[in-house]
Image (tube, rainbow, N blue to C red):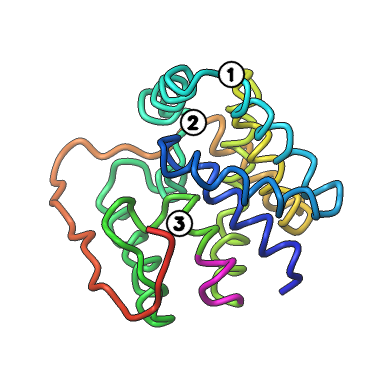
Amino acid sequence: MNRDVAAARLAASWLLSYPDERLLDRVDEITEVVETLPKPLGEPLQLFLGYLAQAPLIDVQSHFVVTFDMKRKACPYLTYWTDGDTRNRGRAILRFKQAYLEAGFDLGNEELADHLSVVLEFAAIGDELTGNALLAEHQGPIHLLRDALAGMESPYVHVLDGVVATLPNLTSEIRQRMAELAASGPPAEQVGLEPFSISITPSPVGARR
């Protein structure tokens, strides 16, 4: 993988995590890396870092919660866009989890396997081919999330712009699927749901969590 693409994805992964002191401790390091990236990759991330530097932490945290935890239209969990609240989503998440296990990737216990920040980290420092495949397969949801953030005028749209810059160009098929998902919304299933396991066994490979 192009080292710049991997660096952009890892930086975006961190910037999509909850903005706490742990993230702030890494901002200088992230900024140094982002400043070395080509303009299409680095500029959007620099814009978000500018917001992060200027806004009070409590405001950033509040915006994060309101944006990602309280509005389904900005859901960062990729399988939600295609499988919604159905039992199929459990199987879809399991595919992510199995891919991480096979690569010896330590997911940790903080996020579900289909969270965009986790997938980006896996693609950057886990298994390149599998990570690329997962991102390409869910390119439509990533673009829909980007468009939702733009519609909300959220600073996080800059992070998604940086992510999109690492992806292949949209095909007509993906654009059609995006239009279908935008029109219909995620599928829903009200009855017959069973809980599914999302635990993962820690592996020797270290991740950022």
Tell me the residue at 55%/71% (across/down).
Answer: 125
| Residue under label 3 | 118
| Residue 185 on image: x %, y % | 46, 33
Amino acid type of the residue tagged 1 in the rendering: Met
As drawn, 67 above or below 171:
above
Tell me the residue at 47%/21% (across/down).
Answer: 63
Q: Please, which residue is most extreme toward the right here? A: 39
Q: Is residue 124 magenta?
A: yes
Tell me the residue at 13%/46% (across/down).
Answer: 192
Q: Regarding mark 1 in the picture, which secondary structure is present there?
A: loop
- Of the numbered discs 3 and 2, the one sitting upstream in the chain is 2
Q: Mark 2, residues whose alpha carbon is within 10 Å: few (<14), some, or many (≥20)?
A: many
| Residue under label 1 | 152
| Residue 111 on image: x %, y % | 33, 51
Amino acid type of the residue tagged 3 in the rendering: Val
As drawn, 201 above or below 184:
below
Secondary structure of the magenta portion, mostly? helix
Q: Mark 3, residues whose alpha carbon is within 10 Å: few (<14), some, or many (≥20)?
A: many
Distance of label 3 from label 2 (alpha carbons) = 16 Å
| Residue under label 2 | 74
Tell me which segment is drawn in magenta. Answer: 122-128
Amino acid type of the residue tagged 2 in the rendering: Ala
Q: Nearer the viewer, mark 3 or mark 1?
A: 3
Q: Which quadrant, please, contains the C terminus?
A: bottom left
- CB atoms at circles 2 and 1 under 8 Å apart? yes
Q: Regarding mark 2 in the picture, which secondary structure is present there?
A: helix
Query: Horizontally, is 88 left or right of 134 in the view?
Result: left
Query: Horizontally, is 59 left or right of 169 in the view?
Result: left
Q: Is residue 9 magenta?
A: no
Q: Nearer the viewer, mark 3 or mark 2?
A: 3
As drawn, 93 above or below 98:
above
